[in-house]
Amino acid sequence: MTSLNIVFSGDRVALIVRGKTSHTHDPGLLAQHADCVLSNGAPIGFFGEGNIGSSGNASSGIGGSSRWSANSSNSSGVGMTGAVYDFATLSRKRANYVNAATARGTGTVSTVLLVQVSAAEAAAFDKAWADMMASPGMFNIVGWNCATHASQAFIKAGILSAGIPGLDTPDNLYRQLCFEKAGKLEVAHGYVGFSPFGGGYMMTVDAP
């Protein structure tokens, strides 16, 4: 089994599209979710909580985020309370997003888009997520979801110039980054995990 270890040193951040099995794969609308990686390697993402019973491996975002349980009282994913999950919360609530062995066991393949950034962009990106964690607001599956909030962080950091073209989906955000940041990207796909490393985290991507 081949593994890629990725260390973050303040000069890059990342977008992770859950359910996207390769750079060219076009995941279904309800088969994708967006998380990000801060400049120190820490995983982070936006989710919806509240009057809904989501399935155990669903992430209240848009894709894997939209697989609600049959007895859900709010299967539309509208009007939920927003929440930002850091490594600790992801470890408790979405272990398959931060533990490569769990990801493999659940078949959770992700594609990681690493983006080279300046020190100022890195700091602004990290701050955008810290501000979002302090005041996450609401979650709606359409137009105010995991991808929308990830997009806001990229825009506030000056990494992207505008919102997501078309629908706010993780894959559309991925494609926008590929277009706007061409020449400053690296891609990896597989089973993703994180472990403490130095003052942050190391990301491991195991080949599927």
Image (tube, grey):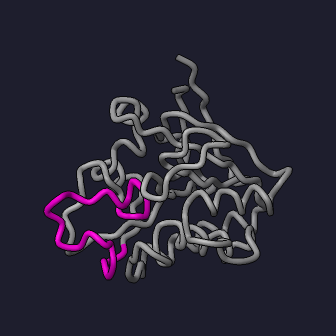
Q: Looking at the image, is 35 positioned above or below residue 159?
A: above
- Residue 119 placement (x, y as % from top left): 75, 62
Where residue 198 sits: x, y (%)? 55, 42
Q: Position of residue 8 (x, y in %)?
A: 64, 46
Please tell me which residue lies in front, 17 or 124. Answer: 17
On the image, which quarter does residue 150 sit in?
bottom right
- The residue under the point 42% across, 81% down is 135
Q: Position of residue 176 (x, y in %)?
A: 71, 63
What's the magenta region? 60-82
Q: Quadrant of residue 155?
A: bottom right
Question: Residue, x 41% and y 45% (percent of image)?
Answer: 97
Examine the rendered structure and indicate whether residue 52 appears above or below residue 59.
below
The reply to whether the magenta stretch includes residue 80 is: yes
Q: Is residue 40 left or right of residue 93?
A: right
Q: Is residue 39 magenta?
A: no
Identity of the residue furthest to the right in this view:
183
Q: Residue at x 32, y 82 (%)?
A: 79
Residue 90 is left or right of residue 203, and the answer is left
In this view, the residue in front, 144 or 73, is: 73
Q: Residue at x 66, y 42 (%)?
A: 23
